[in-house]
Amino acid sequence: MKIRALLSGKIFICLCAFFFLLLLLQNKGRAEDDKKLYYQGVAAVRKNNIDFAFLYFHKLLNDFPDSRYREKALFATGEYYFSSLAYRDASGIFYRMFEEYPESKSSPFVLAYLIKIAQKNGDEETVKKLEKELIASQQVSLLFRDFKELQYSSAMSKKYKALYFIDKIEIYIDNELFAQIPF
Amino acid sequence: MSFSRKSPFKPLSLIFLIIIILCLATLIATSIVNIILTKSLNQIEKKLSTVFNHPVSIKGISFLPPNYITLQNVSINERVADKQKQPISIEKIRCAFSLPSFLKKNFIITRIVLQKPGINYAFIQENFEEILAIINSLYQEQDIKMLIKKARLEISQKDNSSRYIRLDSTLTIAPDKHIYGSGLLSSQDFRVKTAGGKSCYIPALESLNYNFQVFFIKDEAIIENLELKSQQFYLKLWGEHKEKILNLNGHVSFRALPEQRATPDNSHPINGLERFLWKRKKENSSAREISGNSIDIYDLSCTIKNDFPAIQIKDLSFTLGNVPFRLKGMLSLSEKPALNLLFYSFPDQKEELRINNPKRFDLELSANKEEDNFNLTAGLKFIRKTKNRQSPQEIEIIAKGIDLFSDADKKMNTNIRAATLSYVSGATLFNTLFRDFNFLFDFQDALLKSVKFNSGVYDGFLQGEAMLDLSRIPFRGSLDMKLEQISANKLHGLLSYCAKIFGKVSSRIRFLTHPCLKLTGEVTINEGLLDNIIFFNWVADFFNIPSLNKIGYESLSADFRIDNKSINLEKINLKSKNINFNGYFTLQEDNLVASELSLYLSKELLKTSPNFVRLLKYLDESSSSVNFDFQLSGLFNAMNFKWLESDFKQSLQKLLPAYMERGLEKEIERIIEAISGR
């Protein structure tokens, strides 16, 4: 009787461990899925299949809302909408980014995109508000330098650079001037 | 022989004789009537004294054919503090009576002319009911026309001098108890005695045309129409007066600018012909003259309780520019006059909505007489709306010992022994104290009003002039002011930074209202001390020179310009033995800073710094100081900093390794953040 009881206890523990492992594996699988999607998107970018890349990132956002690749995927989606002239969608994405990741390295570039969209819409008041946010995002002390530089690489393989001068901010995308904000 | 030709003179002489007889008869009859009237004078006086309840005296009475009776020098007398006074006196009263009615043994007066009557206002107030009763007794079967010529309505002063309003009027008293009247009101210039034997000149009021229609029932007066008109305004009222309560409704228009009539070009022959051919239209005195420059007040309604000397304004409401207003309060015209008024907008709006209404304001005014002067407290609460928010504001003025008097040119002077001006903006209080504040008002020009003033303020003084240009709409105001010898740290009630600044302030300030509110000027502080100013604390810390925490200086000066878009400090200049500091600083409405500043530190001072003494050898030997030029930008509470190029910086940069540069930058970042309060 004792042995039987002992045996049934062990079986119970094994069963629990088995189900736990299954759960872990499933999550690992899920984690693997979002990573897989992300890198599939990156690979598509490298092959110049921008539309496919967008689809991968978009699926990642829909299926894995808590993914650690969410921020990158959001930014990439916003880039895609902007380059496709879908400014309304781009604006929605970037505003969401600005609210969810205010301290992100990408935030100056998110603001730059939003400023550009507001300029295209002729919304001067929003442009001024966003420019002020961008100016406030960095406090610089330039003793021997002329500017402070921030860099960011997006999932769409674009190189972003923000140069903070004493009286202006310049935003570059792949070394081309994208926006200049004097103050 | 018969004499057939009649003399032509016979009928004529008969007529002449008849005329003489008639004249003689009229003369005799007139004389008899006059003798009877003269003998009955005492009886007439007694009868009138009974009616008026006061002794009445008539100097003379006469009859003039066919139907005129004239009373000379009629007066109502009263005894006040052992003095005989005449609250009502009339130089001449001429009455015309109806002859047909007289022949039917009915004495009906058809016309009364009062020549130069003088009436005391206080007597009317005290005997209003008796006067109403007399008016009621005048009603008869037909209209009575009353002409009042050169009447004086007197208002007695404490010093026995009096002010009067002149009145010329035509009244019609109809049988249906209506009284119709029209005429002209005017007043004279006069002087009032104020404190210390000084006198105050009050200029004559503008003449007013009026017409009214009143209906009396027992002790109630129904004002069916009352119109007052002058060159500057038009007032129309209707209402009632009962048991000391006056209820009125109406509207009023003010001409905002003096009427400017185009002068015709008489040199042109066509204009001359026009003037010859066309008659000028007569003005319709009852028509309203409202030009495009008028200020119109609609929905005027008031309830006033007249319990002289106390006048209680229970409610005075009106609408101006689509904004409703209300005035309530109390006015006492006794020997110790006092005033308590509350004037506010949107009176009927719910409190929870009104409190956030940017157009609402509350003005509270109270004044009273103390010994020979006045005290005044005025408080104004309103909301100041900026681009992004609105905040409650409050201004309070407390003035003690207000004295009014006129100078030789009849200009009004005001002296205030002590005054406090407080301004609350949000949670910040600004306070200024004045003593012996003098104002000189010059309102003689119709289009340009000015006030010159001077006052002691803190331990210094100010003087200036404020002007208001009424020649255009919107009106243009300006204020020019000079401050001298005020200790800077005493101004901390106005500017909190001043608590750490010592020295004597001199300043010129100019304030303009058009085209936008703008404050400009220059300020200099001499022979003073900067005590623990945060910027110099940082310099002291960075350079390790503790003496920079307290900097004695010869002068500190700047020009300033403040408008609704920015605050600018220009030509900032600090001159001290070992430190010079100059530049400009601008703060824009969106809180963005633009500034370039230069700091010069002498070699002697830098030698006292253990951090710096080693670097001095890299300085040019001929230079006696090191300058640090820097630029500030960004948000006020998160400023960006840049050290601008100089020879010293280039020399230093060559010496320092890269990691030290970065270390220094981090240190500067930390200090800038500390100064900015981020």
Image: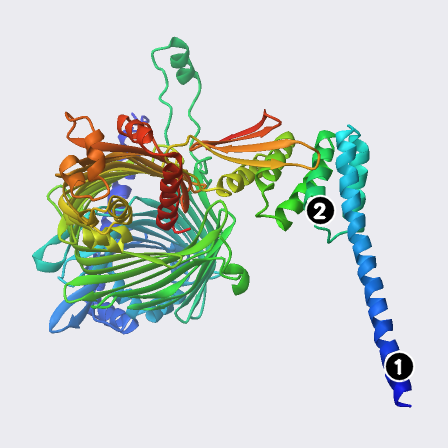
B419, B11: nearer the viewer: B419
Q: Residue at x 26, y 44 (%)?
A: B539
B672, B79: nearer the viewer: B672
Q: Residue at x 83, y 58 (%)?
A: A26
* Name of the residue lying farthest toward the top: B269
Q: Position of residue B422 (x, y in %)?
A: 29, 57
Q: Residues within 10 Å of mark 1 (few under 14, many from 20)?
A: few
Q: Residue at x 59, y 45 (%)?
A: A104
B502, B601: nearer the viewer: B601
Question: Which of disc 1 and disc 2 is earlier in sequence?
Answer: 1
At label 2, the amino acid type is Tyr
The colour scheme is: rainbow
Residue contact at pointers 2 and 1, CB within 8 angstroms: no
* Residue tagged 1: A7
Report the mark closest to the observer, 2 or 1.
1
Q: CA distance from mark 2 to mark 1?
A: 45 Å
Q: Position of residue B660 (x, y in %)?
A: 36, 39
Q: Position of residue A101 (x, y in %)?
A: 62, 48
Q: Is residue A137 above or below residue A161?
A: below
* Name of the residue lying farthest toward the left: B197
Residue B672 in sight from this viewpoint:
yes
At label 1, the amino acid type is Leu
Residue A94 falls left or right of residue B51: right
Same subunit, labels 2 and 1: the answer reads yes
B485, B241: nearer the viewer: B485
Q: Chain of mark 2?
A: A
Q: Which mark is residue B328?
A: none
User: Circle 1 sits in a helix, a strand or a loop, which is it?
Assistant: helix
Q: Chain of mark 1?
A: A
* Residue tagged 2: A69
* Name of the residue lying farthest toward the front: A3
